[in-house]
Amino acid sequence: MSPGIDLARLARRRIQINFGETMMTNYRFDWKSTRRLLAGATFGAFLFAFGTPALRADDDDCQKRIARADHRLHEAVEHHGWDSPEAAKYRSELHEAREYCWQHSHRWWSEDDHRWHTDRDWDDHDHDHDHDHH
């Protein structure tokens, strides 16, 4: 059996004193258990504070990759035309950015509707509607 923390003893220890027929319960502070509690709480706070930024950093990285590729595609189309080699390059870059995010966090950022998608439902031709209107 692995050693564990007895939750009933974390903050105080109960001492019972008999006075004839009257039973009196006295509580005294248990420093050892309190130190364990504080050490556990400190460790938990440390994990919470420094463990989650990596996840946010991954999300930020994915969002920035997709936003940058999306922006570059729009710029290439505006400056070089829809069927240009530059536009084809950035369509491919947008696809790669979405694939990267999907492989790393099983979600991808849509720059057009500014939200995360949890289904692998992007369309590599989702910007074609922009071309139809020019």
Image (tube, grey):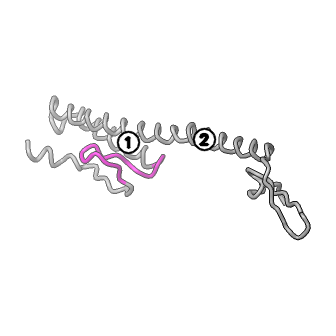
Question: Label 2 is placed on what type of residue?
Answer: Ala
Q: Earlier in the sequence, mark 1 or mark 2?
A: 2
Tell me the distance, in whole angstroms, between the alpha carbons under discs 1 and 2.
37 Å
Q: Quadrant of the C terminus?
A: top left
Q: Residue furthest right?
A: 20
Mark 1 lies on a secondary structure that is: helix
Magenta span covers which residues? 103-117
Split into 4 quadrants, where in the image is the N terminus? bottom right
Position of 113 compared to 24: left or right?
A: left
- The one nearer the camera, 20 or 122, is 20
Asked whether 79 or 22 is in front, the reply is 22
Which residue, given by chain and number where applicable, does mark 1 sit on? 96
Q: Residue at x 82, y 62 (%)?
A: 24
* Picture coordinates of residue 130, whole percent (x, y): 15, 45
Tell me which residue sits at (66%, 41%) in the image. Answer: 43
Q: Residue 23 placed where, x, y %?
A: 84, 66
Q: Residues within 10 Å of mark 2 (few under 14, many from 20)?
A: few
Q: Can you tell which quarter of the image residue 83 is in?
A: top left
- Give how far across and how far down residue 77 sits, in percent: 18, 35
Q: Residue at x 13, y 44 (%)?
A: 131
Q: Amino acid at mark 1?
A: Glu
| Residue 42 quadrant | top right
Viewer-closest of 118 and 7: 7
Badge 1 local density, few (<14 within 10 Å), some, or many (20+)? some
Query: Where 49 falls versus 119 (above or below)?
Result: above
- Disc 2: which residue: 45
Residue 10, x across and y down, in percent:
75, 52
On residue 77, the disc is none
Residue 87 belongs to the span the image colors magenta: no
